[in-house]
Amino acid sequence: MLDAEAKQAIRHALRRSFDSVRGVADAGEFRDHLLALLVLKYASDRTADEANYAVALDADVGLLPPFERLLNAKHMPDIGQRIDRALADLEKQHPLLQDAFHSVRFDSSLLGEPKQRQHLIADLLSCLGLPEFDFRSGASAEAAGFACETLISEAAVVAGKRGAEFFTPPEVSRLIAELLQPEAGESVGDPCCGSGTLLLTCSAFARVRSGGEGCQLFGQEKNGSTWALAKINMFVHEELAAKLAWGDTLKDPRLVAGSQLQRFDVVVSNPPFNVKDWGQEAAATDPYGRYRRGVPPRGTADYAFISHMVETLKPGHGRMAVVVSHGVLFRSGAELQIRRQLLEENLVDAVIALPAKLLPNTPLPIALLVLRKDKRDEHVLFIDASREYEHGKTQNGLREQDLTKIETAYAARADVEGYARLVSQADILQNDCNFNVARYVDAVEEVCQVDLEALRAERAQLQAELEGLETRFASLILEVSPA
C-alpha cells in the first residue's frame, strides 16, 4: 500500500518535471511526452521481474536494461531519436499501446533547437531517474499508477477548461463505483472514456471486493490524444486486456457486436456538456435505434449520450451512472420527452445533486443520473449532496464523510430530512418530469439555539464595561481640557 509520504514524494518529483518544461512548452500540451517517459521508465523497470514487460531499444542492443541506459546517454546528440525508437518498440511489444505515442516525438523541433531540446530531455530523464520513480519494488504498479493519475490531474488543471473533458476527479469516480457495485468479471463500458479514470476505478473496486479479479473494460474516445492517454493509463494500472476504441461514439460507435451495439453490465461516463455538432441530422435513421425515445435537440448532445448509454445496457441487471449538468434535469422539448419515456420505463433509479466546481475549471454544479434495468420499485430517489463538500480555491472536493453520507442514503433508499427523498413516478409526472433535486428535497436551515439567560448576563457585563469606559473617557477629557 502506497503511504501518504510516498505519494507526497511522487507529487513533488512530478512538479520538478513540470518545472523543467516551463518556459519551453505549455505543461498541459507536454503532458503526453511526460507520460511517455513515465511509461518507458515503468516498462524498463519491470523487465527485471516480468519478461512480458520487456522493451527493445533496437535490434543490435536487445532488451532494454534499466532506465539508466537512456539516463547515461542523456547528453548524446541523438537522445531524442533513441527515446522515439524505444517508444516505437514498446508499442510493438504490447497491443494495448499500439499508436499510444502517435503524437509524441522527442526528436522534434517543437521541443526547441537541438541544444535546447537536448538539455530539456536530459532534465526530464534526470527527473524520471529519481528514487521516487523506482518501479522495481513490490509496490511498483501502485506507485506507477499513482504517478500517472497525478500527472493527468495536474495536466487537467493546467489545461484549463479542456481538462474537464478528459479527467474525472477520483472522488466522483469512487462514488460512481460505490453506487453501481461492479463485480469481478463484469463488463464495464464508457462511451466517452477520456483518460479512463472511471473504468479503472470500477475495475479496482471489483478487485478489492473479489480479492484479485477485476472487470472487463471497454471504452471509446473521440480525441486522439486523450485516447492515447487512456491506453497509457490502462497499461500502468495493469489493465492490459482493456479494449479502447478511437472515434466519435455518436457518429461512429466502435464498440459493436456485428450490427448491434455491444452491451455491458455496467455503463459509466462523464461526457462533455452541450456538444453541438453531434450528428442530429442523421439521428432519426440511426441504425442502432438509439433515439427511439426521441431525437435530442441539435444544440446539445447531452441526451444523445444518455440514449446511447441506455441502449448499451445488458437486459436484466444492467446499470449506469452518468455525470450531467443541471439543465439535463429540467429542460423541455425533446429532452422532456426522453426523460418522460425513461421514467415510464422505470429505468430512473436516482438523481444526485453534487456541489459546483467539482470538475477541473468548471464552475457549474453537476449531478449524477443513475439508471437501472433491475429496479424493484416505481420510485426515484433524489439526494441533495450539493451543500456538503471541501471548499477549494479553484476546485471543490468531496470529503470522506460526504461520500459516505451519499452512499448510505442511496443504499437505504429512504427519506432523510433535508437530504434525500423517495418520490413516486406519479408525483414526478405531475411535476412535468422535472428531475431538479431542489423541487423534491427541501433544504433544512439550522436553527440556532439561544440561551436567553446567558445572553442577558453577557449584555449586563458589556453594559457595565461600557459605563466604565465612558467614565474613564470623561475623566481623560477633563485632564486635557484647558483651565
Image (cartoon, rainbow, N blue to C red):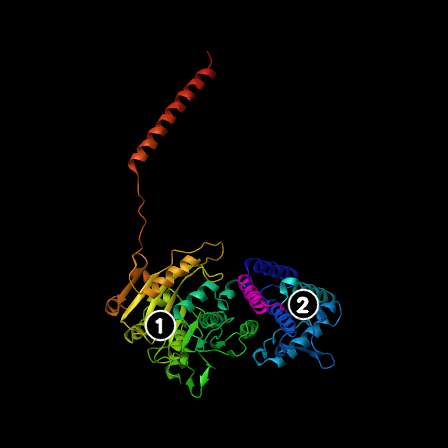
Q: Identify the residue at horizontal 72%, vertical 67% (top origin).
A: 118
Q: Is residue 361 magenta?
A: no
**Magenta part, dominant SS:** helix
Give the farthest residue toward the bottom. Answer: 258
| Position of 41 relative to 391 (above/below) | below
Q: Residue 175 carries which label?
A: none
Nearest to the eye among marks 2 and 1: give it. Answer: 1
Q: How many marks?
A: 2
| Residue 169 showing in the rendered view | no
Q: Quadrant of residue 465?
A: top left
Amino acid type assigned to the residue bearing label 2 in the image: Leu
Q: In which quarter of the image is residue 302?
A: bottom left
Residue marked by disc 1 = 371
Could you say where residue 158 lies in the image, as x and y percent from the top left?
Answer: 55, 61
Seen in the image, is 104 located left or right of residue 198?
right
Q: Mark 1 or mark 2, which is nearer the start of the sequence?
A: 2
| Position of 145 relative to 455 (above/below) | below
Q: In which quarter of the image is residue 348?
A: bottom left
Foreground: 328 or 197? Answer: 197
Foreground: 14 or 237? Answer: 237
Residue marked by disc 2 = 111
Q: Which span of residues is magenta-colored?
A: 135-158
Mark 1 Cα-neighbour bin, 10 Å: few <14, some 14–19, many ≥20: many
Q: Does the magenta stretch include residue 140?
A: yes
CA–CA distance in space, label 2 to label 1: 47 Å
Could you say where residue 242 lies in the image, as x and y percent from the top left?
Answer: 51, 78
